[in-house]
Amino acid sequence: VSTLRIGVARIRTWRWWPVAATLLAGVIVAAAVRIVGGRLEAYATVSLWVALLAVAVIVAAVIASRVATRAAVERANTRALEQARAERRRLLLRLDHELKNPLTAARVGLANLTSLPLPEHAAESARGVEEQMLRMSQLVANLRKLAELGERPAERAPVDMAELLAEVETDLRDAPAGQGRHLVVTVSRAPWPLPPVRGDRDLLYLAFHNLAANALKFSDPTDTVEIRAFENRDHVVVEVADTGRGIPISEQDDVWEELARAGNARGVEGSGLGLALVRSIVAVHGGHASLTSREGAGTLVRLELPAA
Amino acid sequence: MAEPRPQSQGSERPTILLADDEHAIRETLGQFLHRAGFDVIEAGTGERALELAQTRVVDLCVLDVLMPGLDGREVLRRLRRAGSFTPVLLLTQVGDAGERAMALEEGADDYLNKPFDPHELVARVRAILRRSDRGAPSLTASSVLQSGPLRLDRLARRAWIGENELTLTPKAMLLLDYLMTHPNELLTRERLLEVVWGWEYPVGSRAVDNRVAELRRALGEDAAEPVWLETAPGQGYRFIGEVRREGT
């Protein structure tokens, strides 16, 4: 029965009309030949042209139909993707909304408590609770930012990437995590300087700072972290690479998701929102983010942003 | 314009009207503010807040933006329309810069994003009460501000020094707006970051410093000898120019 079903489905989806058109063209040519009889030679050229025309029409129709099908599939995919993103944004905003009031009440309640004279052990507990409350507040703020990022266009001013990456480098070197680390930043200058990227400077800074800080975080003091920026066609490509612990292959697709953390990232402080933020920032700039990693060898994150 | 409202100035404890539809927030925040030295009147709806603000002696309103019925923003609008200049601090739920700019345009004196640090709220409240000119419109209720030759049209988002118009990015303009409406107040980088970007993130102080640098360049200001914008080393920034409402 199932074979029969497949057969019927095939017949249903089978494009019968190009074949029918070919047959029809053949019949017309054959009829023409029969009618002209002895004057075959004189009409042969005409018949040939008719046949060629029929074939051309059929080929064009087949191509047009294929292109239309592909476009329809792509449109449907884009729509589904956009819908999924919009749904996720709505979920994040609802979550943010629902968490905000209880968190506010809890923070104020705790402040009321700590303003009383507490025994030392209670004060210590209260400090611990406060720290966790701050973490939650930060998480809520980041979730909201993620949701907002997808909703409005970023500021659009030309951003000098060499300058921006130099800032990232300086700030990371000054941070405790970057001290004494082997951090190399190269920005292509020949044959011409790297073109600027049109966008929101603060967001781009945040994206590259996040990536480079990740690279430092998930590698050892003896490892190397490289940031490379160069031009590729009309894009500025920035790669952040490290010789760190890498990401297990089964988890590489998921690390861009909100709150996702790789299995070997446990024990390292983080919110699981860094890469999701990077992805959203790249998306609002009309760019593309990709990741290559080998567990135990290192990770390469590549951002491609349209040049201004 | 309405008669100037009676003021509780001179009494030891300023009165705060606290409006939030969440009972837990009213209760905890009410206690906190009381302990910080304020008398607190609570309202669970916008309608009640509006009524209390117009009939009771109130020095400052803390209004939650998202309330069913009349929301905080609408209460603020109606208060201002009725000619009341009681300072208002909005507890916003939305971090977006456009929303915040709108809140300032509508005449809110300040705003905080939930969840906030209650100590920060008290600091904001005290700062507003310090600079509020009793019964008169505050700087945030004015559309054009002036500090020496510097002139800021807050609604048009344009600024001039003398005849020369300044070219500023939208964020630098928002920053200038916040600084000029909060003169002589120490504004931490974290606070400025939240105000202008709606978001506090660990590496954000760089973003604030960059915009301040942009502002200084546009103002032709020497950071070592500032006329307008002073750096409080390790703490933040302070607008030190005297700010007037246009025509005063």
Image (cartoon, coloured by chain):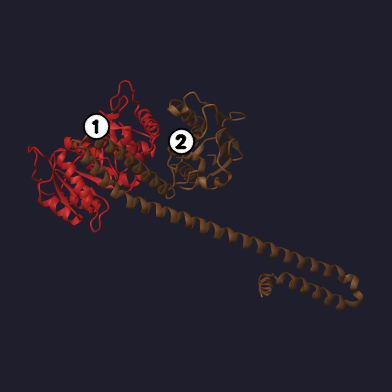
Chain colours: A brown, B red
Residue B105 is at least partly visible in this image: no
Q: Residue at x 18, y 50 (%)?
A: B79
Q: Quadrant of the C terminus of chain B?
A: top left
Residue that badge 1 annotates: B185
In this rendering, position of residue A287 left or right of residue A68: left
Closest to the observer: B168 or B208?
Answer: B208
Q: Secondary structure at mark 2?
A: helix
In this picture, is A107 found above or below A54?
above
Q: Position of residue B44 (x, y in %)?
A: 19, 54
Q: Dot 1, how many residues are within 10 Å of its Cα: few (below 14), some (14-19), or many (20+)?
A: some
Q: Amino acid at mark 1?
A: Glu
Q: Secondary structure at mark 1?
A: loop
Subunit of label 1: B
Same chain assignment for discs 2 and 1: no
Closest to the observer: B146 or B110?
Answer: B110
Q: How many marks?
A: 2
Q: Which label is found at residue A205?
A: 2
Q: Position of residue B114 (x, y in %)?
A: 29, 45
